Amino acid sequence: MNRRFLPAFFLLTCVLLAPQAWAKKKNKTDGVPVEVVVTDQMGQVIPTAIIRHPDEADRHRVNAVDGSWEASVLYMPDGSELLFLPGLSLQLEVSAPGYVTQVIQYDVRKRKNKISISLAELELDNEEIDEPMIQFGRDKPRESTSGTPAN
């Protein structure tokens, strides 16, 4: 090779191969990120929402500002990891105080795993509940055998 073209060849090689060297190689053991956004039926964020896997002991709170939660792996009580890999059928419970709990089933894809969940408010009856009358032995009036009170 001619010395005059050597710097240009070196520069061209660096430009072509550098992005491959700098790019982070995706490890086969890395999970795919899955994002869940929880809102009410009006589209307002529910800052107190909780997300959990039915077999998992931990509860995951959503971000109070935007109502989102994102993960690529869950840690099970037996110490195993549940990696979110493409093709996995993921089941999650989404709940919040004052809202009906939803159980969702989602098939994880290679990318763009964003799930929007809308929770319905609980319908509470505004009827007043009368407290039941429970009588104890000391609340019952004494009965006397004669017509006079017992001393």
Image (cartoon, rainbow, N blue to C red):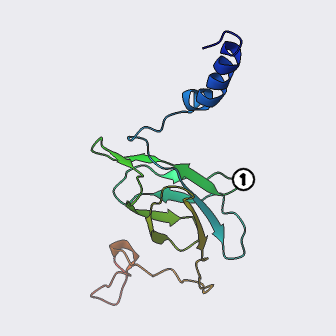
Can see residue 82? Answer: yes
* Viewer-proximal residue among 79 and 134: 79
Q: In this view, does 124 lie to the left or right of 145?
A: right
Of the 4 image quadrants, the one containing the N terminus is top right
104 or 101: nearer the eye? 104
On the image, the x and y values in percent for residue 144 come to: 31, 85
Q: Residue at x 42, y 56 (%)?
A: 86
Q: Quadrant of residue 107?
A: bottom left
Quarter holding the C terminus is bottom left
Residue 116, given in percent of the width and then of the height, sits at 60, 67
Which residue is denoted by mark 1 in the rendering?
65
In this rendering, position of residue 1 left or right of residue 26: right
Q: Is mark 1 on a helix, strand or loop?
A: loop
Residue at image point 51% right, 64% down: 94
Residue nearest the viewer, comparing 121 with 20 = 20
Q: In this view, does 87 lie to the left or right of 26?
A: left
Category of crowding for the residue at label 1, using alpha-carbon neighbours closer than 10 angstroms: few (below 14), some (14–19), many (at least 20): few
Q: Which residue lies furthest to the bottom in this view?
A: 147
Query: Is residue 98 visible in the rendered structure shown here?
Result: no
| Amino acid type, residue under disc 1 in the picture | Val
Q: Where is residue 16 in the image (x, y as percent from the top left)?
A: 62, 30
The vertical placement of 109 against 30, above or below, is: below
What is the count of numbered marks? 1
**Residue most toward the front?**
2
Judged left or right of residue 79, residue 104 is: right
Residues 19 and 83: in front is 19
Task: Determine which quarter of the picture holds residue 112.
Answer: bottom right
Q: Is residue 6 above or below residue 73?
A: above
Query: Could you tell me which residue is drawn at 53 percent across and 55 percent down?
Result: 111
